[in-house]
Amino acid sequence: MENRMSSFDLHMHTIHSKDGFINPHNLFKIMKRHNLRGMAPTEHQRAATLKTIERDGRFILPACEYKSTDFGEVIGLFISEHVENRSFVEIAEDVHDQNGLVILPHPRDPLRKYTAIRKGLPDDIIVKHVDLIEGINSRCIIPYFNMTAERLAARLNKPMTAGSDGHTWLEIGHARTWLQDIDTVDDIYRELKRGRTQITGWPSLFVYHLPTIFWQRIRRLAYDAW
């Protein structure tokens, strides 16, 4: 793949998340179908894998989307140990202690409860503890939210990632992070660490949210009944 750009979906969910519908055994097939070199299953609260899985030049990257106790959600990428759910800074420090990368997802989406804009995440914490900001999230149903996320990244001089935030296979690849000259997982880490990224993407249709909403309600009813 020398001198060529490779695309990655760095924010998505499988059935290991309570609201995901993607079977993780199908991830390599999905990557091939959508011409992706890699995906990061950012499962809620607890990572599904703590090591990179490679097959035929494609990569499943270890990641998790944590819900911090104070400033909303934060993604840990390239984690090798489970991280306990604590404050935003403590989670970020735990991820960095593992040589992982900290990504701030959908920071300017006010329609979600656990985002930086809703929780008032201070700029100084972003500057000190965040490696990359998610500039495009396909589940931000209003494009302006992604535009303001990109402006935030530019203002704070942070490189950007993009992810579909897909919970169904139909959404995968709607947003992509592009990296150049990728042969190994070390290349992926290096390019992200150095902030040499490009991003593309578009909003997913709201209809893709409906299975997630329905399944969350079913699970809530089941827990209440139990």
Image (cartoon, rainbow, N blue to C red):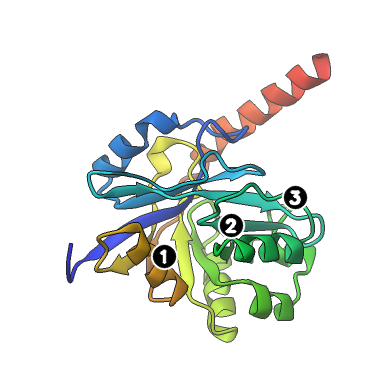
Pointers 2 and 1 in contact (C-beta within 8 Å): no
Q: Is residue 125 visible?
A: yes
Which residue does the image show at 19% across and 67% down from the upper left? 4
Q: Which residue is mark 2?
A: 76
Query: Quadrant location of residue 213?
Result: top right
- Relative vertical location of residue 37 with respect to residue 211 in this rendering, above or below: below
State the image coordinates of residue 118 (x, y, percent, origin top left).
75, 62
Mark 2 Cα shell of 10 Å, populated few (<14), some (14-19), many (≥20): many
Q: Residue furthest top?
A: 226
Residue type for callout 3? Asn
Which sits earlier in the primary sequence, circle 2 or circle 1?
2
Residue, x 32% and y 67% (percent of image)? 179
Mark 1 sits on what residue? Answer: 189
Q: Earlier in the sequence, mark 3 or mark 1?
A: 3
Secondary-structure class at tag 3: loop
Q: Amino acid at mark 2?
A: Gly
Would you say 223 lies left or right of 179 here? Answer: right
Kind of residue at disc 1: Tyr
Across and down, in percent, residue 148 comes to 58, 73
Q: Residue at x 47, y 46 (%)?
A: 51
Q: Is residue 68 above or below residue 212?
A: below
In the rendered image, which residue does mark 3 sit on?
Answer: 85
Query: Eyeballing the image, is 90 above or below 37?
Result: below
